[in-house]
Image (tube, coloured by chain):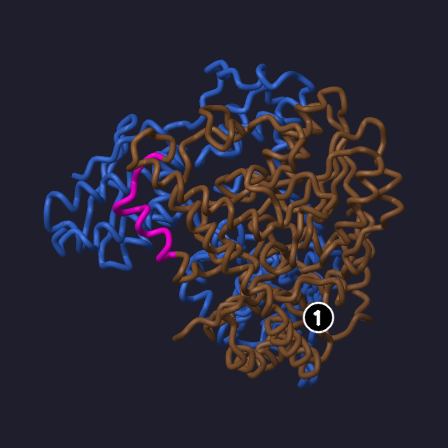
Chain colours: A blue, B brown
Amino acid sequence: MTNQYKPIKKLTSKLRNLRTLRLMWEYTDQVMDFFYNPRNQGKITEITTGEKVVTGEVGSIACGDALSLHLKVDETTNRILDARFQTFGCASAIASSSVLTEMIKGKTVDEALKITNKEIAQSLGGLPKEKMHCSVMGQEALEAAISNYRGVPIVSHEEEEGAIVCTCFAISEARVKRVIQENNLKTTEEVTNYIKAGGGCGSCLAEIDDLVAEVNNVSIEAVQKTAPPAVKVLTNLQKIALIQEILTEHVKPVLAEDGGDVELYDVEGDIVKVQLKGACTSCASSSATLKMAIEATLRERVLPSLVVEPV
Amino acid sequence: MSVIYLDNNATTKVDEAVLEAMLPYLREYYGNPSSMHTFGGQVGAKVKEAREQVAALLGALDSEIIFTSCGTEGDNAAIQAALSAQPNKRHIVTTAVEHAAILNVCKRLEKKGYKVTYLPVNRLGQLDLEQLAASITDETALVSVMYANNESGVVFPIEKIGQIVKAKGVTFHVDAVQAVGKIPLDMKSSTIDMLTLSGHKLHAPKGMGALYVRKGVRFRPLLIGGHQERGRRGGTENVPGIIALGKAAQLAQHHLGQIEWERKLRDRLEYGLLSSIPDSEVNGDPINRLPNTTNIGFKYIEGEAILLLLNKNGICASSGSACTSGSLEPSHVLRAMGLPYTVLHGSIRFSLSRYTTEAEIDQVLAIMPTIVERLRALSPFSNDSASWLQEQEKTLSVSH
């Protein structure tokens, strides 16, 4: 193998790893930095007139994380003067809490409330899917703290816990059952279409068969049938949006590490036209390998029929 | 950075002598042991020798050893064999703390109409033997109980259990994956009918195991095929793996004589951690326990965070916390023991091997207090009286 191929091999294996991260999580450097060097840990003790200190406490002991978020707010301007955290949890819980305190300092409470859990995850360069609940915890603690500041009741969120059925997309048994019930789903294929469960590696399809059969109280054979093609899964617009999202969240960051980039150029039917940029586009064979890697990712996460064409 | 490997209940280093023993059978001696020619036949002789070595470690007859691909296969084959031999008995007794290779097979069987009793354990991780006796009925086809627990290291009183089981005439299977090589075994004087072992837990490579089946016990194969393993496991033998397992069994038998050294090192680690770190406690029966394992709960902090900081210092251990399990559930073993969530999530398992040195233990003792202190400084909890925490514990103990 020539040296030229090595980065491509590394790249394709990275793209492949996106769907198989397990156990020892693939944390980003930002997550590890905020975990090893947490900013703003502790409580707020010093306070002067015109300021109010409030706390938002959320957490799920069952999942093993809890967060106590402390805010010091200027009562005239409603601006967050200081934010500190105390977290019981794993590396991503600690990092999410810490980065959140950095994000909200200096914002008004209204501005802070607009922060979504996705933004918290993004400011850490992304979180493993199974760890997205850590960013949700941060966002909920913020809501709780601000509700306390305003003296209004806290909106409660229903949490989905329990055994994970689909590890590729971190979908719990409870969620699969609920979507089957709420949407009156009759086959496993429908479940995959609705919430992607089973649409990754496919190793949980038999388990989903069991759940569909259990909820509907029918035989396993009945649920394995292909659903009638009445339900159109994605509109063209949804498809383009999803492709764009997968490229932005899962492909670009990997390419960026090696100085490469990709832009969505157009989508015609199942043909996804992309522009490859930067490093690794210097020779035809590397582009071909890259095309296959991107195609595999899109096929897995969007539609199995997609074809990627570099333009 | 050199690695301090204290995760030997997960897997172990392949012994150099084991590797040396198997290599010729990957290179020049590739014959099929079933062949008529000398080239294959000499391999067959070596497989026979390996079988004798494994049998010797267990105090069993050669013909009672079936080579398998792993512990999971052994467990599956044993359950399946017991059930197919007694098609009209549709009840299984096992424990709540078994390995997934038993628990998930039982769950699947429940869906097929079998009844399964999952015996609970107490705070020490031990069973109530009266409850066990009472759970066995005329319908019971099999009692399957692990010898030693992989997470807590707790050792069950297997022969006492076996006497109860055999008095009722029921087949007795033991998953001894964690016990073989750490506890002396003698099948000749045992009540065990079937016993599972795994190669990679005793310094053989992954992908190799064995199932002991007592002479006279009815056995139908899980893998149906050729006449290999006396018709009890089809498929051409994994010759290099079998030879490796044989060698590993021989070394394990020798090492059993020095197991007290391992126990002393483990005790040194445990005592050192408990005395230097407040709010830490040993999980599980401190007396009836594997000599190489300690599971310690460090309260108010979370296991994954501890593991990552240990990892940064080159120390490999494992945790029963939810965040390391791949699901959102913390360890079923520690939950079955009824540990409070604060202890459970901060539980770390250190498992030693014959390669562990005193210097390595001292290094862990030097680093661990700083790690715990650092994470506790971040934690909102510092004692059990936090009302917020108690509230959650209460709700959860109801829902679980």
B31 is within the stretch colored magenta? yes
Locate residue B352, reporting x and y percent.
Answer: 56, 67
CA neighbours of label 1 inside 10 A, class few (<14), some (14 to 19), many (20+): many
Q: Residue at x 18, y 55 (%)?
A: A278
Q: Is residue A116 visible?
A: no
Q: Is residue B124 visible?
A: yes
- Depth check, front residue: A304 or B312: B312
Q: Residue at x 68, y 60 (%)?
A: B152
Locate residue B136, reporting x and y percent.
Answer: 84, 35
Q: Residue at x 50, y 44 (%)?
A: B51
Vertical position of residue A222 compared to residue B91: above or below:
above
Location of residue B42 (image quadrant): top left
Location of residue A16 (image quadrant): top left
Locate residue A99, reporting x and y percent.
Answer: 51, 68
What amino acid is found at the position of numbered circle 1 in the picture? Lys
Q: Which residue is mark 1?
A: B299
Q: Which stretch is magenta? A: B19-32
Chain on which label 1 sits: B
- Depth check, front residue: A76 or B198: B198
Q: Is residue B43 left or right of residue B201?
A: left
Q: Quadrant of the N terminus of chain B?
A: bottom left
Locate residue B30, reporting x and y percent.
Answer: 29, 40
